[in-house]
């Protein structure tokens, strides 16, 4: 009985401390970033599929601008040149190998991962309404943070790992881990903070393409 009472006392006294620690983690997370309006970067992407126990590596360059516009150019990899455009209204996927252009509405699942990464790079603090900071630490001039969903039952994301340069205040690495054991890693370098022309976010290539519309 004494042990049970002691356990209850300890639980009641440590619970407020745990709750107080969480806002401090959130505040620290917000401090390490500088919010960007535009950026151009080089990137590499590693995609791991647990079912096949195989990783695929691709690379290229990308352009991000608020509010939520992006262009990803995957220039290296077996799949050949692929481009993703999103101008805030329409997502377009161009695959040079097949001369194929796919247009999607803004709610397409294809856009979710790319959009999440854009949010992490441009304004990571904006994600705090959907994720909470589980862990944060500094090492070798970089700050590393682990985010977990506020509502795990409504997402297939298990956690997100973010690495930020303490000097440049720039996101150098993002890893998104899924509940099924798959994950995607993006590494970024050579950031250029200059205004992107809005035209680059709309597909404008000329040629004889097969065009498909989805939704």
Image (cartoon, grey):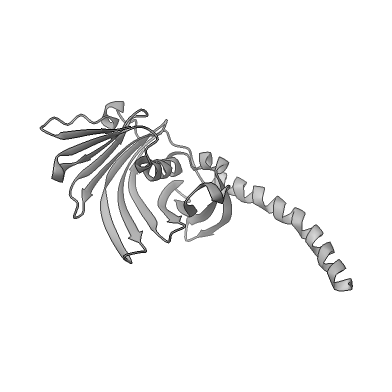
Q: Position of residue 128 (x, y in %)?
A: 56, 43
> Which of the 4 quarters of the picture holds residue 98?
top left
Give the vertical position of 213 relative to 13 (above or below).
Answer: above
Q: Is residue 207 visible?
A: yes
Judge from the rendering whether residue 57 lies leftward or rightward of residue 22; answer left or right: left
Residue 163 to residue 104: above or below: below
Query: Which of the pair 117/138 is nearer the observer?
Result: 117
Q: Position of residue 69 (x, y in %)?
A: 36, 33
Q: Position of residue 46 (x, y in %)?
A: 32, 57
- 208 relative to 170 in the view: left or right: left
Q: Which residue ends up furthest to the left in the rendered image?
A: 208
Q: Residue furthest front?
A: 215
In terms of image quadrants, where is residue 92?
top left
Residue at 22% over, 34% down: 212
Relative to 102, 155 lies left or right: right
Residue at x 40% of width, y 51% of height? 172
Residue drawn at (81%, 64%), measured in percent from left and top? 10
Q: Quadrant of the C terminus?
A: top left
Q: Judge by depth and name the residue closer to the eye, 62 or 113.
A: 113
Residue 75 spot, x, y in % from top left? 21, 47
**Left or right: residue 102 compared with residue 191:** left
Q: Quadrant of the N terminus?
A: bottom right
How many callouts does the rendering have?
A: 0
Is residue 168 something that shows in the picture? no
């Amino acid at each position: 009985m004494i042990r049970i009472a002691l356990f209850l006392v300890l639980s009641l006294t440590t619970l407020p401390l745990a709750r107080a620690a969480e806002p401090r983690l959130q505040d620290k997370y917000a401090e390490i970033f500088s919010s960007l309006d535009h950026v151009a970067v080089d990137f590499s992407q590693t995609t791991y599929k647990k079912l096949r126990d195989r990783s695929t590596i691709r690379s290229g360059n990308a352009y991000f601008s608020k509010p939520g516009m992006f262009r990803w150019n995957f220039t290296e990899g077996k799949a050949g040149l692929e481009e993703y455009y999103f101008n805030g209204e329409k997502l377009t996927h161009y695959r040079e190998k097949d001369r194929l252009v796919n247009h999607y509405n803004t709610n397409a699942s294809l856009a979710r991962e790319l959009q999440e990464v854009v949010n992490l790079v441009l304004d990571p603090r904006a994600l705090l309404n959907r994720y909470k900071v589980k862990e944060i630490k500094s090492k070798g001039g970089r700050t590393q943070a682990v985010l977990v969903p506020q509502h795990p039952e409504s997402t297939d994301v298990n956690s997100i790992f973010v690495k930020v340069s303490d000097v440049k205040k720039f996101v150098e690495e993002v890893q998104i881990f899924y509940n099924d054991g798959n994950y995607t890693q993006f590494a970024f370098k050579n950031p250029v903070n200059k205004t992107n022309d809005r035209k680059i976010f709309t597909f404008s290539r000329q040629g004889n393409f097969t065009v498909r519309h989805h939704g």
